[in-house]
Amino acid sequence: MTIIDNAVYVDGLRSAEPQSLEQTFETLTHHGGMAWIGLYRPTAEEMAAVADEFGLHALAVEDAVSAHQRPKLERYEDNLFTVLRPARYLDSTETVEFGELHVFTGRNFVVTIRHAEMAGVGRVRRRLEGRPDLLRHGPEAVLYALLDMVVDDYAPVVAGLENDIDEIEDQLFSGDSSVSRRIYELAREVIQFQRAIHPLPEMMQQLRRGFEKYSVNTELQHSLRDVEDHVERVISRADSFRDLLQNALTLDGTLTANRQNEASAEQNEQVKKISSWAAIFFAPSFVAGVYGMNFDHMPELHWAAGYPMAIVLMAATATLMYAIFKRKGWL
């Protein structure tokens, strides 16, 4: 069994550390309290054993094994199945890494299932063990603390994405050719981030609807509302990132088109100049070509003014064409 941590808490204090699920169930039966079992990527057989001990619903167990679930909260009689998508920003690669955390909560147990490397669950356990006054409120305290941890860890992600967007704005005006690809990659990360956080408000509302029915402690209610406020702020920031990236993509397209137009205009100017000079030199070449033909019966061949007239004609034609092209702005 891939058990990371297994403990039974009585009145908010860690009172037993069973070595197996059977011992955990026996400890709960004889001493009461709350069991908190942490698993890492359990197999179908391992989850079946957990389901047998705590009466977990088959559909929820199947989701917990297969992973790749969207964030959600489902109630099966007195048990809750919660899926969260933790995230962290990696400075080394400037990317966002997403994890997956499943939480089963019942009347006297919590089962956390991790599908990625993350130290957050252990951090929450240690914090709650230092606050017996919170932990004695049972599974709700653990679930709310895990929600709080996941949402708090979104703050560095928001800061990292914001910094990446600032860098993109600098790249846009520097003419960096790789900025389009970076915008698309960042937009994909923002979309994944939105998928992780957008379901959270509805999940919070579902939990709030159970406050009275399950007699949730007032302090825990305040804690959940505080988490809900943080979620709304994170969602607002993430949505603004989506708009900024869309605007950046539009601006990149506009700047690229302008650069292409400028290059095309410059190229057209060069073509005009080349064509103009070619036309100017064509006229003298034509006259010279005519006089260079080896015919015996050409009146101009024996005309004394023929040579000066040809030179004047070539010069005049070239000058006239130069003046015309200059006036049109081709030269």
Image (cartoon, rainbow, N blue to C red):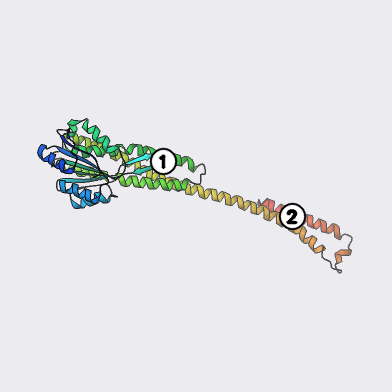
Residue bearing mark 2:
320
Residue bearing mark 1:
94
Q: Is residue 292 above or below residue 327?
A: below
Residue ID at (24%, 32%)? 127
Question: Can you name the residue that lies furthest to the left here?
Answer: 30
Q: Is residue 11 above or below residue 277?
A: above
What secondary structure is found at the residue carrying circle 2?
helix
Looking at the picture, tell me which residue is in the foreground, 268 or 313: 268
User: Earlier along the polypeptide chain: callout 1 or callout 2?
Assistant: 1
- In the rendered image, which quarter is residue 225 located in? top left
Quick check: can you spot residue 38? Answer: yes
Q: Position of residue 212 (x, y in %)?
A: 13, 40
Give the side of residue 112 with respect to residue 11, left or right: right
Q: Position of residue 278 (x, y in %)?
A: 71, 56
What secondary structure is found at the residue carrying circle 1?
loop
Quick check: can you spot residue 229? Answer: no
Looking at the picture, tell me which residue is in the foreground, 280 or 133: 133
Give the side of residue 40 with respect to residue 27, left or right: right
Give the side of residue 69 with respect to residue 166, left or right: left
Q: Position of residue 94 (x, y in %)?
A: 41, 41
Question: In the picture, which quadrant includes the N terminus?
Answer: top left
Give amino acid for label 1: Glu
Looking at the picture, tell me which residue is in the foreground, 83 or 161: 83
Separation of disc 1 and disc 2 at Cα? 64 Å
Q: Which mark is residue 251?
A: none
**Mark 2 Cα within 10 Å, few/some/many (few <14, many 20+)?**
few
